[in-house]
Structure formats: structure tokens, C-alpha cells
Amino acid sequence: METSQQTKRPYEVVVLVHPDATIEEQKDLFKKNKATIESFQGSVHSLETWGKRNLATPIGKLKRAYYFHATFEADTQAITELERTMRINDKVLRFMHTRIDERTALSKFLESFKKGLSESAAREKEREAKMQARKAAFAAAKADRGYDRE
């Protein structure tokens, strides 16, 4: 069993769950995943719910899904089993496991990841504010020229 300790590597996963899935179904999915990881002597470090969001491209006829992000340490065999069970589950729309660089601690990875998310959200808000300002300026210029008169 010492070989499994040596091959334990850090991973992150993003899972997209069907928007009609109940909270109980979501909890059951992640309880099974946690049990699978722990059966291979792994450990789950964090599980975050990003909530119901719009998909970039529709999956079938679905335009929204629940997003989940998790980080954990596990054996490569655990990843194979996780992917097998997620493919079987009808409520899982998409998933992606990514191996994290072993030289960085998971806590530091999560910290930088969250910082990147907040910076991205700030840029998006700034972009939206600029767009609103442009629309307001265009509407004001249009009104000054008299295009709004009927």
C-alpha cells in the first residue's frame, strides 16, 4: 500500500450538474465521490458550489447548470473510478479533472484561484459599467440631435 501513498497527487475537478437535480441528488453525488476518493486513501480538501449559471454553449437543450469546484488528493486509480461513476450518472452533464502542480500546496493554489476569480469578476463588472456608460452617452447624443422626436 505504500505505492499508493507515493502516487497520491493533487487534483481539481469542475462538475456541471443537471439544473433539475435536487439538492439531495447533488449531495448524494458528492458523498459518493468523497467515499470513492477515501477508498483509494485520498482526501477531499474543498468543495465549492458556484450555483446555477448559464452555460457557454448549450448541452442538448439545456442552457443552465449547477457548477461545482472541488480540490482533493488522490491516486490515479481514484480518478479512473470517479470518471466511470460520473459517466454513468445521468445528472452529471460534464466534468473535468485536472492535475495540479505538486510543487504548490493546495491551500496556496485555492488562494490564487479565488484571487483570479475575484479579479475576473471585477473586470467583468468594469466592462459592464463601461458598456452602460456608452449606451447612456449614445442615448444622450441621440436625444440632443433630435432623433427622438416623433
Image (cartoon, helix red, strand yellow):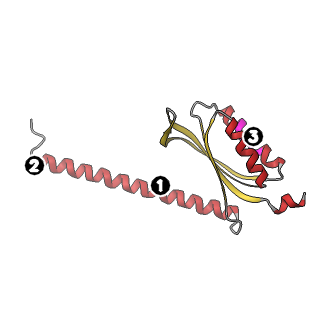
Residue 63: x and y, percent? 48, 36
- Mark 2, Cα crowd under 10 Å, few <14 / some 14-19 / many 20+, is few
Mark 1 → mark 3, Cα distance in angstroms:
30 Å
Residue at 76% over, 40% down: 32
- Residue 123 visible (yes or no): yes
Residue at 14% over, 46% down: 143
The disc placed on residue 145 is 2
Residue 68: x and y, percent? 62, 45
Residue 142: x and y, percent? 15, 47
Which mark is in front, 3 or 2? Answer: 3
Q: Is residue 130 left or right of residue 107?
A: left
Tags 3 and 2 in contact by the CB under 8 Å rule? no
Q: What residue sits right under mark 3 in the picture?
A: 31
Residue 81: x and y, percent? 76, 45
In what element is the residue under mark 2? loop
Dividing the picture into quadrants, the one containing residue 5 is bottom right
Along the viewing direction, whichever of 74 and 112 lies nearer the viewer = 74
Q: Which residues are magenta?
A: 27-34
Q: Earlier in the sequence, mark 2 or mark 1?
A: 1
Question: Which amino acid type is shown beneath numbered disc 3?
Answer: Lys
Q: What residue sits right under mark 1 in the picture?
A: 121
Along the viewing direction, whichever of 61 and 121 lies nearer the viewer = 61
- Mark 1, Cα crowd under 10 Å, few <14 / some 14-19 / many 20+, is few
